[in-house]
Each structure stands twice: as C-alpha cells, then as structure tokens.
Image (tube, rainbow, N blue to C red):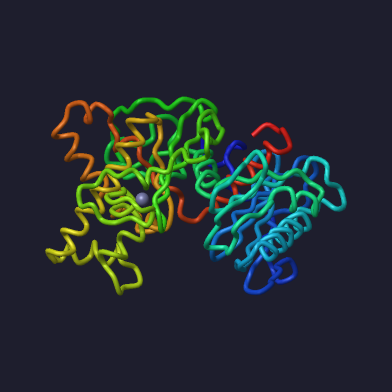
Amino acid sequence: MTAETASSPIPSRPGPAANDQTREKAGGGACRPDSGGQAGLISLGIDIGGTKIEGVALDRDRRVLATCRLPSRQGSQAVHDDTVTVARRLMSLAEVGDRRDGITLGLGIPGRIDSLRGTVDDAVNLGIGHMDLGPSVSRTLGIPVQVENDVNIAALGAACQSHSSLVGSGERGRGGDDATLPQDMGEMPQTRSLPPEKERVVVFINLGTGLAAGIIRNGSIEHGASGAVGEIGHIPADFHDFPCKCGQTGCLETVASGSAVEAMWPGVPHPLPDMIDKARQGDAHAKESLAVIGHGIAMAVQIVALTVDPSLIILGGGMTKTGQPLLDLVDAELDKSARASHFIASLDLPARIRLAPPDLPIGAIGAALAGRKAGRLQV
Ligand SMILES: [Zn+2]
C-alpha cells in the first residue's frame, strides 16, 4: 500500500490549489477546499486545541476535501460557536448544500470526555468546567456528533496513516509490510510483518506539554472503564521523584514531556533542540538532562510495549517536531536496555517506533474517522 491508495487520508484530492477566491479568512484563520464538490458521505473532523481549532472534511475514501482553521477562544459558548463556524465552512467548501444525510462530525478536545454522552469536563486550557459539547453542536448543525479526547483522535489519525508516511529512523528495517523504502537504503534487515490496519494494535504516545497515550485496537479507540486508559504520564516510575501537578512524585510526565524539558532547560524558545545541540558540544548539564529525558521516553515506550504489546508505537505531539534527533535519543536508550536484557532485546522495540507525520492534521483526520461512529458508518 502506498500513500496514493484510497485507504489513506494523506493525499489531498487532485484539484485546484486554494486561491484568493476560495480562501476564507476570519480572525487569523484560514479555510480552503482541496477539490470540487462531493456527492456521498462526508466526514467532518475538528480538533479543538488550546491555541487553534482545526477542521477537515473527508470523503468516503478518507481523502481530504477541505481544511479550515480558526484561533481558539475561551469558554463554552465560544467553543460551541467556533466549532459550528468551522463545521459550516467545511460543509460549504465541500459543497454539500442543504443536505445533512450522510454527514457526520467528530470532535476532539482536551479534558475528561464522556464519549457516550458527548460531554467535556475540565478542559482547563479552553476555560471549560463542564459542557454538553456533542449534544449542543449536534442540535445546532442537525448532524450526528461524536466527542473524543484529543490524544485519542490523534492516535486514530496517526494509526490510519499508511506506513510510508510515518517517519522511522530506517536504521533497523522499519516498515515491515507496506513501507515504501528509499532505493538507496540497500538491503534491509527482516522485521516482523504488520497485520492489516483493521487488525492492528497501535499505541500513540503524545509527547506534548504532558504525556499520555492513545490506544487503537482494530481501528477503534480504546476507552477503558473510566476513560483514563493511556494516562501513562501519571505512572510514578521515575527515581528522581520530581513533584507532579497530579499530587504524586516521580510521574513519568516529569521526565518525558514538553513541560519536563522546559523545567530542565528553561529560558530558550526551543529547549529540546537546544539541549541536544549543547549536549553534542559537550555541555555536561545538557548531556545529563538529555539522558533523563531520553530515559523517560524510553520508559514510556517500554511500558506501552509490555502492557499493550502494539505492533506500532507512534510518537507524536509538540516534542516530536525535533524529528530524527529525538528518535535517535530514544533508540539509544532502548539499545541500552536491550543490551542489558535479552528479554527486552527480543521485543525489537526500535523497529516498532515511528514519528507521526509533522505536517498533517492527524487530530482532525482522526476526529473525522471517529465521527463516523456517531453516524454508524464504516470507519
Ligand atoms: Zn502525575
């Protein structure tokens, strides 16, 4: 399978690029169609974050029909109104007219989510204490709405990407099934074959301000009993015993997250790349800090590997914008564990790790796919 096949949401439909006539702007946002109108099923997905609201419209074959983005505003009413605005613009750009049949909407938002009821609690970055987000947006738009946690939709969006779009180091034969490998990589070592997408277990580790994981099993988000599944950031597993905002000490989040990096390397705009640069130049404090971060992320990888045993572990979130140097750091830590333990070596963890594609709205794409559940459509 390549990025051009219908099951991948990666390629935009062939069509005119956005131009002055089709581009809409509002409050710094931007919306554009990626093709002409579309008959049939339309899946809208909107990722509501602390700084921006990002939406996509997908067709039945998961191709991107339109994208739209607005800056976020605080409070339940503003979140409702902006979500409706983005959804309506996406429908307009996808030229669905007045019809509402076959149109679904998935929403991803931080906080505690009850995906059965469509409610959100404690979305602190958006100023929301409690909100009936799904029901209110569904009433306004007249389409079914599914609400999910933001990490879970990013997990779903990343898990459905074709293998060739996920970034691996290429050093250990990443890409067991359908990866399109560059010609110059020579003979690749054999790795285990991956099952088809629908049968895969994929874990997405979000290395953002905090640390959390989303689990996708057989193409669906795993919720657990209380929605806390994947909250690995609050496993108290690190011996430094740094205090965590959750009240415990030694949480993984205190050594494997953007906030951990900022706490160890304060006062610079891009602390992780800077820390890596300084470590390469021989700075002892940078080396020490980097070792703590690398060990923390590797520990997160080992925890999801040993509890869920996924075929793919995708690293995403703001920290992964660092790219290959981050992957190298994690690989080096995993190598250390593998050299010390035949058991860990047998898990072949570096071969399972990928970086999420940095330039795709995987949260919005995952939200669109999750939204199909609300309309009881094939994901
Ligand atoms: Zn904690």
Left/right of residue 90 with respect to residue 1 in the rendered view: right
Which residue does the image show at 35% across and 61% down from the upper left?
259
Q: Position of residue 65 (x, y in %)?
A: 69, 51
Residue furthest front as drawn:
247
Left/right of residue 4 with respect to residue 214 in the rendered view: right
Q: Quadrant of residue 23?
A: bottom right
Is 281 placed above or below 152 here?
Answer: below
Name the one closer to the observer, 106 or 350: 106
Indicate the quadrant containing the C terminus: top left, top right, bottom left or bottom right. Answer: top right
Which residue does the image show at 54% across and 28% down from the upper left?
198
Which residue does the image show at 43% across and 38% down from the upper left?
203
Q: How many marks?
A: 0
Q: Position of residue 180 (x, y in %)?
A: 43, 38
Q: Position of residue 352 (x, y in %)?
A: 35, 35
Q: Position of residue 56 (x, y in %)?
A: 65, 53
Which residue does the image show at 52% across and 40% down from the upper left?
227
Is 146 placed above or below 133 here?
Answer: above
Left/right of residue 128 with respect to residue 329 in the rendered view: right
Q: Quadrant of residue 301?
A: top left
Name the one closer to the observer, 202 or 37: 202
Left/right of residue 357 with respect to residue 340 in the rendered view: right
